[in-house]
Amino acid sequence: MGSEVSRYDQVADWYVEFTRSWGSEARTLLPEHLLGQRLLDMACGHGALSRVLARSGAVVTAIDLSSSLLAHATQKESTDRLGICYLCADATTTDWWAGNPFDGVVCNMALMDIDDLDAALSTVSAVLKRGGWFSFSLLHPCFPGGHDGSTEALPSWPPDRGYSSEGWWTTGSDGVRGHVGANHRKLSTYL
């Protein structure tokens, strides 16, 4: 996203409410033993996964460009203290980083929101300790599906203009991608 204001700032309250009932399946994809691991939650949003990680015993630093979503995260931290360090920071730079490497980095459903993917992945590489791990989840680049598995609300899914045609898109619907859009990328672009 570079240095511009986060697209989520204008819809933060709506987003938190819209995603309130969503459970994060990301935890099942992470290493089983997180106790004492230093983790970075990159593009943490309102901190839902950050809290799951902290409850698993990890020492969590969580960054996001959206000050509005971070306000929700820090409010939750103030009433349910888990020791999470939230920073309003850009995932495409290391300006926020003090230099102490992380054991792992997670980026849950956010890489498609970051315009400069190469810079974000460079950040991951820079902040991970040697032998560290990176786990990410993202929108399926080939097949549409709402959070409930439906496809009706996604009339402009990128493959409609061709899977190989990468670029910015929005659904024009009421969901998250209708509000903030996303970068469509081929799976090979991520890997």
Image: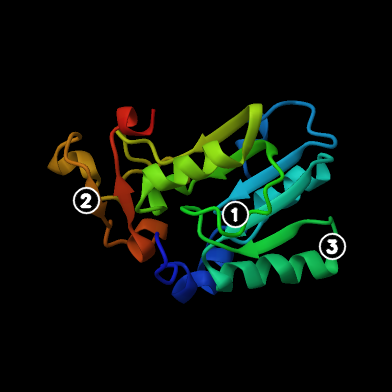
Residue matched to label 2:
156
- Per the model, the C-alpha gap separating discs 3 and 2 is 40 Å
Q: Which of marks 3 and 1 is nearer the N terminus?
A: 1
Q: Is residue 117 left or right of residue 20?
A: left
Q: Earlier in the sequence, mark 3 or mark 2?
A: 3
Above or below, comparing residue 131 to residue 180 in the picture: above
Observer-side mark, 1 or 2, equals 1
Q: Residue at 40% of width from left, 53% of height from top?
A: 113
Numbered label attached to residue 163: none
| Residue type, label 2 | Ser
Residue matched to label 3:
80
Residue 160 lies, in percent from the top left, at 16, 42
- Per the model, the C-alpha gap separating discs 1 and 2 is 26 Å
Q: Residue at 84% of width from left, 62% of height from top?
A: 80
- Per the model, the C-alpha gap separating discs 3 and 1 is 17 Å
| Residue type, label 1 | Cys
